[in-house]
Image: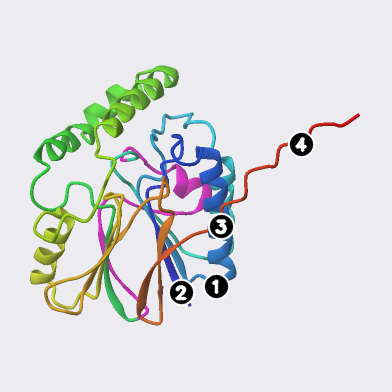
Amino acid sequence: MPTFFASDFHFGVDARTTSRQREEAVVRWLDHCLAEGADAIYLVGDLFEFWFEWRYAVPRGYVRFLGKLAEVADAGVPLHVFTGNHDLWMKDYLHQEVGATIHHAPVRTTIDGCKVFVGHGDGLGPGDYGYKRLKKVMTAPWAKWLYARLHPNAAIGLANYFSGKSRDSQPSDEAFRGPENEWLVAYSEQKLARDAELDYLIFGHRHLPIDYTLSNGRTRYLNLGEWLNYQTYVRLDAGEASLLHWTGFAPAPRRPSPRVN
């Protein structure tokens, strides 16, 4: 039975489609996974543009997505959720409410006989030292405690402001930069040098769908892309991974024709 991987839905921010349209498309994709007899589903970080779990509150919205996750788990399909750089403060809400297994770091696992290393990808590989330092601060217990003291209205507004600033600073014409300039390719090569049995290294975070064969000529680095523009995911079935594009967006509603008297 196939295993499915996807990441970087970024619910809460509009892009080529609205957040609501993207949420509905992901729900249909999850229905597709169930219809295909999914053995497991891996959601590999940045599911939300921002996420924080106060003691008695979480960000509003996303009820269709959260309800579908509960349906997936209730159907007995193992559901693995990874934290990303936008939802790194995720704790146990999705575990308690929908039965997901939460991962705060990459994991090595065996799927259908394949040795797979999977994680969001933020902070891995050479470079990006500013973010690596910031992540240590943001994940410190004292930082989470202080942020929890903010009222959700202020906390979410502040997070969305800085998230928008960060996104505005990113290049709009992303392309594969070559293996020497792709940090996750470099990290994958380093990981492969220490663990030669790996068949696949699967990450998100990069926001570009990538299927790259590493230097041993066999092991593949796969980046899941994102759903703001690409709507890509990976299907691992019978030992073969495929990077696919989901086309199941609902058509825009037709405007009513003008009345002719």
The answer to whether residue 5 is left or right of residue 260 is left
Indicate the secondary structure of the residue bearing disc 2.
loop
The boundaries of the magenta stretch are 88-112
Residue 140 x/y as whole percent: 20, 34
Label 4 Cα neighbours within 10 Å, binned few <14 / some 14-19 / many ≥20: few
Is the residue under label 4 in contact with that under label 1 (CB below 8 Å)?
no
Q: Residue at 51% across / 65% down in the picture?
A: 77
Colour approach in the figure: rainbow
Q: Residue at 67% across / 42% down in the picture?
A: 253
Label 4 belongs to which residue? 256
Q: CA distance from mark 3 to mark 4?
A: 24 Å
- Residue 209 or residue 119, whichever sits in front: 209
Question: What kind of residue is marked 4?
Answer: Pro
The answer to if 184 sits in the magenta stretch is no
Total labels: the figure holds 4
Residue 191 x/y as whole percent: 13, 65
* Label 2 vs 3, first from the N-terminus: 2
Label 2 belongs to which residue? 2
Q: Nearer the viewer, mark 2 or mark 3?
A: 3
* Label 3 vs 4, first from the N-terminus: 3
Question: What kind of residue is marked 3?
Answer: Gly
Q: CA distance from mark 2 to mark 3?
A: 19 Å
Q: Nearer the viewer, mark 3 or mark 4?
A: 4
Is the residue under label 3 in contact with that under label 2 (CB below 8 Å)?
no
Is the residue under label 4 in contact with that under label 3 (CB below 8 Å)?
no
* Label 1 vs 2, first from the N-terminus: 2
* Label 2 vs 4, first from the N-terminus: 2
Label 3 Cα neighbours within 10 Å, binned few <14 / some 14-19 / many ≥20: some
Question: Looking at the image, is 135 positioned above or below residue 71?
Answer: above
Q: CA distance from mark 2 to mark 4?
A: 42 Å
Label 3 belongs to which residue? 248
Label 1 belongs to which residue? 37
